[in-house]
């Protein structure tokens, strides 16, 4: 998963509808947006973040920084996904980084029952995808200990990635 930076704008309610269009026009000349979703701008790096924040300061727009994780296009999303992320305007799936843990299952012995461990973990998964030939799984960050416990019960381990 790729890191991205979300900039959540707190647009004033009393502004005219064209205000948002003015901001987008100002951004177009100075910021390379990766994507956007409603009132969130998504950029790829710190330079673009800083350039966007300067424009927000000029227009006096409160902006909250939200670290995001971009999932690969082929990722399988579960029904739980929408509580932890969103699909952007350009159909990119994003997770809010502070809410998730990403891991892979490691077979540590011949007795390891990886498939059984995965069956037990299945109901908690938010997404899964393959990266460099390895299966990667995403869960709520509060469930990291549970994932370790399940893996241990089936004589394998998890390696936390994010």
Image (spheres, grey):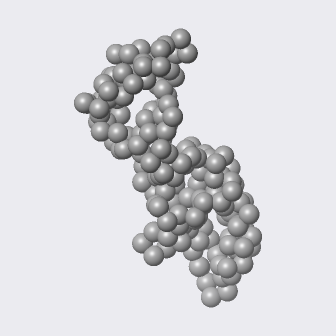
Residue 113 on image: x %, y %: 68, 81
In the displayed structure, would residue 67 be above or below residue 112?
above
| Horizontal relation, residue 111 to residue 43: left or right | right
Residue pictured at 46% horizontal, 57% vertical: 1
Query: How many marks can you see?
Result: 0
Residue 99 on image: x %, y %: 60, 45
Residue 70 on image: x %, y %: 46, 52
| Horizontal relation, residue 1 to residue 30: left or right | right
Residue pictured at 41% horizontal, 43% vertical: 35
In the displayed structure, would residue 86 be above or below residue 146?
above
Residue farthest to the top, as pictured:
14
Residue pictured at 38% horizontal, 16% vertical: 59
Residue pictured at 74% horizontal, 70% vertical: 120
Between 66 and 40, which is closer to the camera in this rendering?
40
Between 145 and 76, which is closer to the camera in this rendering?
76
In the displayed structure, would residue 84 be above or below residue 8?
below
Asked which quadrant contains residue 157, the reply is bottom right
């Amino acid at each position: 998963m790729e890191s991205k930076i979300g900039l959540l704008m707190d647009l004033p309610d009393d502004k005219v509808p064209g205000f948002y269009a003015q901001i987008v026009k100002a951004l177009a000349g100075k910021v390379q947006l990766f994507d956007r979703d409603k009132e969130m701008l998504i950029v790829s790096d710190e330079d673009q973040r800083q350039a966007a924040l300067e424009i927000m300061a000029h227009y006096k727009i409160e902006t909250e920084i939200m670290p995001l994780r971009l999932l690969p296009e082929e990722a399988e999303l579960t029904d739980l996904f929408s509580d932890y992320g969103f699909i952007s305007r350009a159909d990119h799936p994003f997770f809010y980084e502070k809410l998730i843990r990403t891991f892979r299952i490691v077979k540590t012995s011949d007795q390891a029952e990886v498939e059984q461990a995965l069956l037990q973990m299945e109901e908690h998964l938010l997404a899964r995808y393959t990266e460099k030939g390895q299966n990667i799984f995403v869960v709520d960050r509060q469930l990291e200990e549970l994932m370790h416990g399940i893996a241990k019960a089936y004589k394998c381990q998890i390696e936390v990635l994010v």
